[in-house]
Amino acid sequence: MRDYTDDTLSFCLDDGARLLDGPGDEAPTRLLPDATRNPLNPIRVRSWLLPVVLLGFLVAGGFLAYRYFTAPGGRQIESIAVMPFVNESGNVDVDYLSDGMTETLIGSLSQLPNLNVKSRSSVFRYKGKESDAQTIGKELNVQAILNGRVIERGDDLTLYLELVDAKTGDRIWGDQYNKKLSGLVSLQTEIARDVSDKLRQKLTGADQQRLTKGYTTNTDAYQLYLKGRYFWNKFTPADHQKASDYFNQAIASDPNYALAYAGLADTYGSSATNGWIPPTEGYKKGKAAAKKALEIDDRLAEAHVSLGAMSMFFDFDWQTAEQEYKRAIELNPNYELTYELYSYLLSARGRPEEAIAAAQHGLEVAPLSALLSDDVAAAYYFGRQYDQAIKQNQKSLELEPDRPGSRVGLGNIYDLQGKYEEAVVEYQKAIRMSERTSNILGYLGHAYGASGKRTEVLKILNEMKEMSKQKYVSPYDLALLYTGLGEKDKALEQLNRACDERAGWVIYLGVEPLFEPLKTDPRFQGLLHCGIPQ
């Protein structure tokens, strides 16, 4: 990933700006007396000539510095945060449009090689909150903030944009766009071009093509895609079902819509990993969608990440997965999901320091993302750096106090440290913040079992069995519960099932500290084909 620093900015003068204007300002020496009429000694002339010339340079340099460092719009902006566009339509059902237009612009600007664009998760934490540009600029470490307001009235769409200097709060540029909803696709291309121009980006022809590339010309397909991403980002089982429906509808409207296939792959893959749908079914569909996306557009970073995830979770093909993640970083170093999944792979393969570095890269792209912060904590956890993991999970909770993943992370560590009551408290908080998924119940059952509360474990086990009648329950989660109880035979039986079914987080089998009591058993070693580093 590129390093971006605010002290290495390049600036440019406005067109036609000169230090000297008019015919009388051709050179500083014109200000000196004519030497043929000067009664002073030539040596004395030379002695005061140098200070005058230096003064001229200082004046010119001061003016140049003023032009470079204070003139609004005169500099090339190298870092930007595109804030969530505000839906002023008076209809919450249009949120998908304002959110989607924001994400599309972030994606377009992220294609530019010399521009650091803050990720979706970094900027969307400000949604619905009052924050001034200078505060956001400091928190996200960017030079400029782009604000937008969207109004939809029937088939009429109005967009107001404003580019603000994050240091001074001054308005650099603003414009209003009035379009029919049928012109939504062309509008996205237009605003990407306009914003890039106001950022003073120096673009090659290839850069221009990437910036203005439209993945579909079909407005219906585009809107369906935006709805799919809107529900995908909500990240619940029910919302992912809606997301897959919308992505499939987008593909039906435009069978060559690569982004829609990538979105569908992400939905199937994440639902399978989290145990919301049977993994084998989800990964197979996800892999097919990712391959189709790459057949259409092999430069689509999102699709490379999707294929990498399927290769990792479903095929246990670590080499292909790593190649896909690296290719995605080459194509779009601002795409945060790449670093998250790459850190998973590195942890699973027993490369903890690399995993920590990859997750931290992701956090640089999305500095205020509690999700990426949790990924750093997880990398510390699998690397057995528990104190660092606790600190990082606590940082995540500072960013997002109601984040269940951070609570689970803390619970895992307290469980390992024998602080079972603290672990149970964290797991129960996570359940209240989300829902009673088999994943969290498996961890809770482990803590109860390890603390000797067998009655509580059996209650959870019965709950999970009843749950399995309605939806998929991961055998990996059951294995955690049985390990806490000390029932190794049942735990290993469930892990064998988890391996066969490619259940969720089985890639971590070789590095999950909670499975440490099983590792001396030869049967556990027999699960090497299930992704344990050799």
Image (spheres, grey):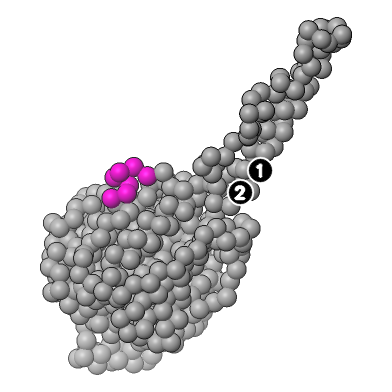
53 within the magenta span: no
Prevailing SS of the magenta stretch: helix
> Is disc 1 in contact with disc 2, using a CB cutoff of under 8 Å?
yes
Viewer can see residue 251: yes
The residue carrying mark 1 is 66
What's the distance in space between the residues labelled 1 and 2, CA to CA?
A: 7 Å
The residue carrying mark 2 is 71
- Quadrant assignment, res 32: top right
Foreground: 61 or 492?
A: 61
Foreground: 415 or 374?
A: 374
The span shown in magenta is: 203-209
- The spot of residue 440 in percent (x, y) is 36, 80
Up-down: is 311 above or below 238? above
* Mark 2 residue element: loop
Name the residue located 58 percent from the left edge and 71 percent from the top edge.
Answer: 131
- The spot of residue 173 in percent (x, y) is 52, 59
Foreground: 350 or 527?
A: 350
Name the residue located 82 percent from the left edge and 10 percent from the top edge.
Answer: 37
Q: Count up the numbered dots.
A: 2
Amino acid type at image mark 1: Tyr
- The spot of residue 69 in percent (x, y) is 62, 45
- The spot of residue 190 in percent (x, y) is 35, 61
* Mark 1 residue element: helix
The reply, left or right, for residue 419 in relation to residue 306 is right
